[in-house]
Image (spheres, rainbow, N blue to C red):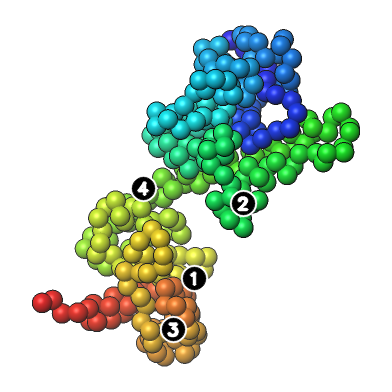
């Protein structure tokens, strides 16, 4: 079956068919997008995928509409838009085509569906109002994409299609960036797990580069870890580990005596040659070398343990 056409409706565009088009154009790069409601285009055929138009949801016929009576719903009874339907049926292949390893495809698919696709579905069906974002309601992705429509008095017959394709490029960048970030988090988790194993019962986690690490720490049950040391360019950083997903409270702060100090002042107070900076909030510091960063980390661990309340 050769897919020559990707058929969606003409007129004003919305986030759901734009984002559906992102997925489909990756899988069928030679197919032409046809924006039409003409019966000859929105009738199923072996050469096309029809979405957000057509009046039916029939995956075998490759029609993915959600505007009809008895419209499709998820297992939890939340409504699909065309984006949700396209992601359900084509998302796994899209991820593989995007270079996501097979071992990570299901995890990334579920995460993207939950955090990106579902909100678009809900907004498109009126089940979620962008107004919940308060002053930022106009800055939601559906709202921003719709601002790319032609203005009302642009009478150029090609304006809508040009605007659609311009918006499609922008929508593509958001999808690709989100997928890349999700895949990167899984790669980071693997590296962080190795670093946690190397740390053993020590209190300091040393990472080979800056990366998301807290999910791996939580998954490993590594409650004993207090600080993270990481190279950054020619320097090294030392930071705390947040207690919770939300908020900024740390398992342990850097010594208050270091707060806001830099250069020689920090070297003198800390006693570590090569110490260069400590944030006034005592959540991050920097040093000229790995040895200096680890020395600062060990001092921070010692002070934290010394100040713990004695066990009753």
Alpha-carbon span between mark 1 and mark 3: 19 Å
Query: Where is residue 312 drawn, in percent x and y?
Result: 10, 77
For residue 99, say whether it is visible: no
Q: Which residue is mark 2?
A: 137
Q: Which residue is mark 4?
A: 190
N-terminal label among 2 and 1: 2
For disc 2, the neighbor class at 10 Å (few under 14, some 14 to 19, many from 20) is some
Quadrant for residue 222, please give it: bottom left
Quadrant for residue 18, please give it: top right
- What secondary structure is marked by label 1? strand
N-terminal label among 4 and 3: 4
Q: Which mark is residue 235?
A: 1
Query: Where is residue 287 drawn, in percent x and y?
Result: 45, 76
- Of labels 4 and 2, the one closer to you: 2
Give the residue drawn at x 56%, y 24%.
66
Give the residue drawn at x 59%, y 50%.
131
Give the residue drawn at x 51%, y 68%.
234
N-terminal label among 1 and 4: 4
Mark 2 vs 3: CB contact within 8 A:
no
Q: Which mark is residue 119?
A: none
How many marks can you see? 4
């Amino acid at each position: 079956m050769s897919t020559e056409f990707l058929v969606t409706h003409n007129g004003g565009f919305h986030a759901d068919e734009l984002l559906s088009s992102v997925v489909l154009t990756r899988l069928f790069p030679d197919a032409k997008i046809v924006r039409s409601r003409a019966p000859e285009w929105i009738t199923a055929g072996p050469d096309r995928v029809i979405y957000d138009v057509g009046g039916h949801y029939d995956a075998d016929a490759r029609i993915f509409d959600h505007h009809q009576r008895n419209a499709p719903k998820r297992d939890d009874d939340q409504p699909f838009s065309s984006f949700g339907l396209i992601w359900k049926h084509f998302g796994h292949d899209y991820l593989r085509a995007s270079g996501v390893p097979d071992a990570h495809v299901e995890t990334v698919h579920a995460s993207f569906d939950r955090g990106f696709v579902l909100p678009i579905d809900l907004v498109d069906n009126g089940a979620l109002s962008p107004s919940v974002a308060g002053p930022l309601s106009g800055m939601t992705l559906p709202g921003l994409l719709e601002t790319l429509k032609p203005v009302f008095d642009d009478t150029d017959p090609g304006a809508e299609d040009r605007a659609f394709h311009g918006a499609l490029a922008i929508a593509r960048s958001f999808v690709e960036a989100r997928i890349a970030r999700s895949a990167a988090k899984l790669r980071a988790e693997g590296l962080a797990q190795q670093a946690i194993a190397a740390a053993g019962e020590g209190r300091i986690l040393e990472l080979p580069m800056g990366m998301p690490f807290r999910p791996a720490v939580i998954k490993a049950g590594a409650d004993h870890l207090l600080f993270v040391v990481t190279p950054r360019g020619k320097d090294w950083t030392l930071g705390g580990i947040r207690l919770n997903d939300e908020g900024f409270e740390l398992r342990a702060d850097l010594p208050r005596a270091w707060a806001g100090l830099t250069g020689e002042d920090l070297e003198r107070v800390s006693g570590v040659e090569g110490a260069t900076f400590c944030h006034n909030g005592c959540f991050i510091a920097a040093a000229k070398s790995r040895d200096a960063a680890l020395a600062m980390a060990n001092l921070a661990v010692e002070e934290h343990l010394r100040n713990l309340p004695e066990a009753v």
